[in-house]
Structure formats: C-alpha cells, structure tokens
Amino acid sequence: MRAILTFHSIDNSGAIVSYPIKKFAELLEKLRKSNIPILSLDQILADPFKQGVVITFDDGMRSVYENALPILKEYAAPAHVFIATAAIENTENIEQAITIGDFDMLSWHEIEQLQASGIQVDAHTHRHPDMRTINKEQILEEFHLSHEILASKIGVTPNYFAYPFGYHNQLARDCAADFYKASMTTELKPLSKNYDEAAIPRLDSFYFQTSNAINNLDSSMMTMYLKLRNAMRNVKGSQCKATAK
Ligand SMILES: [Zn+2]
C-alpha cells in the first residue's frame, strides 16, 4: 500500500465531505494492525519504494483540531492540513473572507496547536478558486497571498500544495511546480513509483467510506475498484468537455 488519503472534515454530520469520527479511529487501527505505516509527504516521496499511507486534510476545518487531532495523537500519526487562508477567521482583509460550506473553520490558535502536535501546515491557495479559470497573474497572487498570511500568522513557509477541488491545468501545474516540492490533486489512485510532482494522485475518503473498502485497502480488489471509479470519472470529465464551450 502506497497512497495519500484526502479528508476534509472528521465529524458525524453525514455531509459529503465528512468522514465519521469512529471510522477515522477504526481506519488508523486497521492501518496499525496491517503494519501499514502512516508517513509524512517528505517520507513517502523520498523513496519510490516506501510503503505507507499519508493522511491529508483539505481546507482547514475546525473538526481537524477537535476530532481528528486526539486520534492522530493516540496513534502518533503525522498528517498534513492544506489551509485556504481566506477561510480562516481573523483574515485581515475581511472582503476576501470565504466560507466553505457550513463548516466552522480553524482559528490561527488552533492551527498553531496542530503544528505543535506534528501536523504540517501546507498551502491550498488564499480564496480557493478553480485554478483552470484564472490567469497566471491571478494564480501567482493566490500563492503569494497564501504564503504571506501563513508566514505572518504562524511563521510557516509551505512545502506542499493541494489544488482547490483538485482542479488543475498545465498553467496551474507549471506555476505550482515553481512554488512547491509537490502538489496534490484528487486523481483517484494510489501513488506509483513514477509520478508527476505537480500532479500527485490521492484517494478521497469518500471512496473508502465503507468498512469493506477499509478491509480491502491493500488488495488487488481495491486497486480494481479504484481504477473503475477513475475510469468512470474520466468518462464524465470528457463528456463535460465535449459539451462545454
Ligand atoms: Zn479545498
């Protein structure tokens, strides 16, 4: 097993971006019992043969602090949280504040607490745009703003990036490659030995919600399932392109 897992919120609301608290604890227990290590991005990307799982959270929802952190601590598990800086409270320019669904977002104090517990803070733009729809100047502004805020609030220069919604094009990948060691997409597949550092695939928690999928994390059945889901998504994508102007 060599994969990067994507979560958003860890809570029991049943929302599409929510992963239940108990199942999150069960997943970590399952990984421990299966001797699958939980790694940082530095660790898994340093060695193409390294087996393990990386846990990532997109956006910066408060439940990462309230519900995921106690479980991560119990398992001494590292993780990454990709923060959309305009979604975090106390953003200086209030006009730029965005909301992500109905979710409470982390405070800067909570983000510092995550860092102190070994959770790495990384970049997810400032305003969370679909990067296929903005020009180079706007992409660079997103990166610069996000970096300025992360540096001034918590003294962090992010190494890694997650594309908002997982959407990217050649321009976004080229810009991200100049800024980050590696950039995460939502392309649904495990991490192979060879990959494009500007478009790293991840497995979204939505697709391994069922306990059966967790039990089969390491099996060829799971690989086939993921290939099938990816193929279906690609079909949908190309249909959209065919009809969109
Ligand atoms: Zn996001």
Image: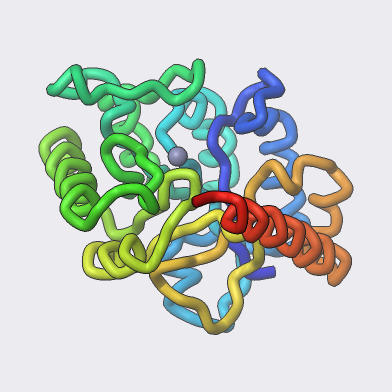
Residue 205 placed where, x, y %? 66, 44
Camera-side residue of 178 and 174: 174
User: Can you say whether 86 is above or below 4 in the image?
Assistant: above
Residue located at (34% from left, 58% from top): 160
Camera-side residue of 17 and 47: 17
Camera-side residue of 154 and 82: 82
Residue 115 placed where, x, y %? 33, 41
Residue 216 placed where, x, y %? 85, 58
Residue located at (27% from left, 22% from top): 97
Residue located at (67% from left, 46% from top): 28
Q: Does 144 sit left or right of 160 as displayed?
A: left
| Figure quadrant of residue 210 | top right
Q: Is residue 94 at least partly visible in the picture?
A: yes
Quadrant, the N terminus? bottom right
Q: Is residue 121 at least partly visible in the picture?
A: no
User: Can you say whether 120 is above or below 86 in the image?
Assistant: below
Q: Does 53 sit left or right of 119 as displayed?
A: right
Residue located at (68% from left, 63% from top): 36
| Figure quadrant of residue 82 | top left
| Figure quadrant of residue 121 | top left
Residue 12 placed where, x, y %? 68, 21
Q: How is the image coloured?
A: rainbow
